Image (cartoon, rainbow, N blue to C red):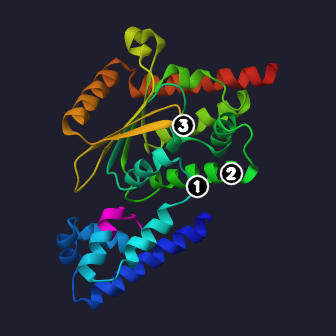
Amino acid sequence: MVNGSRQAAWEFFGAELKRRREGAGLTQMELGARVFVSGGYIGQFEQAIRKPQLDVAQRIDEVLQTDGIFERLCLRLIDDRRYADYFAKAAELEALATKICEFAHALVPGLLQTSEYARAVTLAMNPLAADEFIGEKVQGRMERALILKDATRPVYWAILHENVLRVPVGGADAMARQLDHLAMLARQRTVLVQVLPYAAGAYSLMNGMVTLMEFEDAPPTAYTEAVYSGNLLDDPAVVKHAYAAYDLLRAAALSPEASLALVESAAEDHRRCATTT
């Protein structure tokens, strides 16, 4: 399903929710209280700004007595091949988060990738895949990044290991453009980026990818990812430990200003490599 038709389907979900809610004589606040979200969230569902989690859709069906229509719509829209099975739930939560903090050791995080970079990563992981499959994965990543353009975009903070800047994913030209994009987002204050340099010593040995998400009406969650696997963690003690580890990385990383300078310097390095090869 292309981006336009998928958005139209979510708009239908929102319009139908509003129609059924008003038919039941409930305000957004009243419905929100019954399904354990805020009235503001109900309004955002109705405007297709945010997408409800499956359990919220199920509770809406129960309260409005709609015979499972919102659960079925939600399943249909969530169930697509753009995301790996282990990441699908995290992608759903990502769209609802009010704050996202990520640490990446090897690759630019998905929300910050250019389509060129995303295609190179997807091809490297799936060298024998059909063009349609590659296109769906890249499209999914680009659609995810749209949350950073929303008026209600989450606060986004990324810590990138220096490895991320140095490996020429997709070639030197493509990598230079990826780092230009990253620098632009930082300069526009859309995102906050810090780099963990090699000089950080033992901290630079940390690997893997960690995403911390905070929500308006739900406890924070941590998501960790390795090769072909991911774990969504919601145990309060584990999430607290993940936040403490992230704070240590933040303290060891370069300042945002020094990080931006290093990103721009790395982009120029890749550009020079492109012109000499």
**Marks 3 and 1 close (CB-CB < 8 Å):** no
Image quarter of residue 276: top right
The crowd level at tag 2 (other Cα within 10 Å; few <14, some 14-19, many 20+) is: some
Give, as a three-letter code, the residue at label 2. Answer: Phe
Q: Secondary structure at mark 1?
A: loop
**Marks 2 and 1 close (CB-CB < 8 Å):** yes
Q: Nearer the viewer, residue 188 or 77?
A: 77
| Quarter of the image where the C terminus is located | top right
* Residue at x 55% of width, y 55% of height: 143
Q: Which mark is residue 133?
A: 2
Residue 40, given in percent of the width and then of the height, sits at 26, 68
Marks 3 and 1: which is nearer the front? Answer: 1
Whichever of labels 2 and 1 marks the residue nearer the N terminus, that label is: 1
Q: Nearer the viewer, residue 259 or 97?
A: 97
Q: Is any part of residue 265 visible from this angle?
A: no
Whichever of labels 3 and 1 marks the residue nearer the N terminus, that label is: 1
Residue 80, given in percent of the width and then of the height, sits at 55, 59
Give, as a three-letter code, the residue at label 3. Answer: Leu
Highlighted range, magenta: 49-57
Distance from Cα at disc 2 to Cα at disc 3: 26 Å
Question: What residue did someone put label 3 on?
Answer: 182
Give, as a three-letter code, the residue at label 1. Answer: Arg
